[in-house]
Image (cartoon, grey):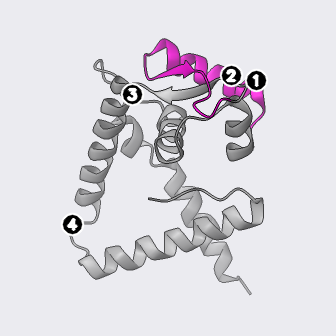
Amino acid sequence: MIRPTHEVEYEQMLLSRHTSLHQRGGRRKDGVLERSAYVLLSRIRIQGPMSIGELSDAFGLDASTLNRQTAAAMRAGLMERIPDPEGGMARKFRITDEGLRLLDEEREWIIQALDQVMESWSDDEIADFASYLRRFNTDIERLGGRPWPRP
């Protein structure tokens, strides 16, 4: 007997292949955010400036991976390194005004794409779907010990 989680696995795999919500069919010349930058900036925006160590704990990634991602984001002008606002020794990463602008632009584009995908859904259906996704994500976060802050 096939368990319902088999269907969840298959649909999750299919969902992960839909990169058009993030890449818009390829890169734009005016600077679409890479998926890793989108997630990184989203976390820093909600949590505030973070050090490499804090990012490593939050994402469960090694420091070398995060060093590459943050270096690329700094080169692109999306974030900057600042002294710890709380006086700690580690320097922290803060989103620049340009990073905020591009993050807002990207998020708005994704929301518009989702509006198109879900145009035949009622508001209640969308709210139910969002609730199930939130529950799914928070259960994954609970098992991994890495909760994601939500607005």
Q: Are marks 2 and 1 in contact (CB under 8 Å)?
A: yes
Question: Which residue is denoted by mark 1 in the rendering?
Answer: 64
Question: Which residue is denoted by mark 4 in the rendering?
Answer: 119
Task: Assess disc 1: are there few (<14), some (14-19) or many (≥20) residues with their C-alpha within 10 Å of its C-alpha.
Answer: few
Q: Tell me which residue sits at (34%, 24%) in the image.
A: 98
How many angstroms separate mark 4 from mark 3 (CA)?
A: 30 Å
Task: Assess disc 2: are there few (<14), some (14-19) or many (≥20) residues with their C-alpha within 10 Å of its C-alpha.
Answer: some
Task: Indicate the secondary structure of the residue bearing disc 3.
Answer: helix
- In the rendered image, the quadrant that contains the C terminus is bottom left
Task: Indicate the secondary structure of the residue bearing disc 4.
Answer: loop
- Left or right: 56 as drawn, with respect to 26: right
Q: Are marks 4 and 1 in contact (CB under 8 Å)?
A: no
> Splitting the image into 4 quarters, where does residue 95 fall?
top left
Residue 143 rendering spot, x and y as whole percentages: 76, 66
- In the rendered image, the quadrant that contains the N terminus is bottom right
How many angstroms separate mark 3 from mark 1 (CA)?
A: 22 Å
Question: Which residue is denoted by mark 2 in the rendering?
Answer: 67
Using the image as rendered, state which of residue 18 and residue 131 is in the foreground: 131
Using the image as rendered, state which of residue 33 and residue 44 is in the foreground: 44
Numbered range of the magenta stretch = 61-87
> Splitting the image into 4 quarters, where does residue 115 fall?
bottom left
Mark toward the start of the polypeptide (4 vs 3): 3
Q: Are marks 3 and 1 in contact (CB under 8 Å)?
A: no
Task: Indicate the secondary structure of the residue bearing disc 1.
Answer: helix
